[in-house]
């Protein structure tokens, strides 16, 4: 059983390594964190969104509130960025299911911040 848990953890770390934002996007993610948390809370409370989307957002908020990380901070790059990577993956999923309009409608920050969010979450086609 311990071997299975360890294998699952290694696979998750591998997925995070492949999905992580490149370059300055990690710094942008840290700068956007307060607006991102407000966005996630607003989206999770929106009864107009599909239930599955709201469940993902509540689970993401619970993950972000946990006192420990999926990847310990001593692991280079991923240890510091695992929360930003998980947020980006969940936001991609939310946009696929609920649409970019829902995210834009609940965004509490500036238009520049929204463009940075789109870059972080890999939503390049929605920047027009």
Image (cartoon, rainbow, N blue to C red):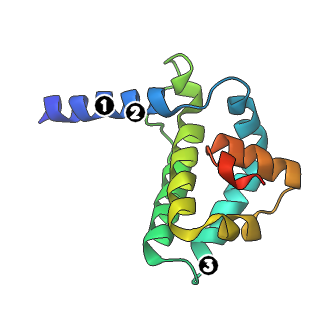
Residue that carries the numbered disc 2 in the rendered image: 15
Give residue 121's quadrant in the image: top right
Residue 115 horizontal side relative to residue 4, left or right: right
Which numbered disc covers residue 29?
none
The quarter of the picture where residue 1 lies is top left
**Mark 2: few/some/many CA within 10 Å (<14, 14-19, 20+):** few
Q: Mark 3 highlights which residue?
A: 46
Q: Position of residue 74 (x, y in %)?
A: 51, 18
Mark 1 and mark 2: span between their CA atoms? 6 Å
Disc 1 packing (10 Å; few <14; some 14–19; many ≥20): few
Asked whether the residues under the numbered discs 1 and 2 touch, taking CB atoms below 8 Å apart as contact, a structural biologist would say yes
Seen at 76% across and 36% down, the residue is 28
Seen in the picture, residue 11 relative to 56 is either above or below; the reply is above
**What secondary structure is found at the residue carrying circle 3?**
loop
Q: Earlier in the sequence, mark 3 or mark 1?
A: 1
Residue 11 is marked as 1
How much space separates mark 3 and mark 1, taking CA atoms? 33 Å
Q: Residue at x 38, y 27 (%)?
A: 14
């Amino acid at each position: 059983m311990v071997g299975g848990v360890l294998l699952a953890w290694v696979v998750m770390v591998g997925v995070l390594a492949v999905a992580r934002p490149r370059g300055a996007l990690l710094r942008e993610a840290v700068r956007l964190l307060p607006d991102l948390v407000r966005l996630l809370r607003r989206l999770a409370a929106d009864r107009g969104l599909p239930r599955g989307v709201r469940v993902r957002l509540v689970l993401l908020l619970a993950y972000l509130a946990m006192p420990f990380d999926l990847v310990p901070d001593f692991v280079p790059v991923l240890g510091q960025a695992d929360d930003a990577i998980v947020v980006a993956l969940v936001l991609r999923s939310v946009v696929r299911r609920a649409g970019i309009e829902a995210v834009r409608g609940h965004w509490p920050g500036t238009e520049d911040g929204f463009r940075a969010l789109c870059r972080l979450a890999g939503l390049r086609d929605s920047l027009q």
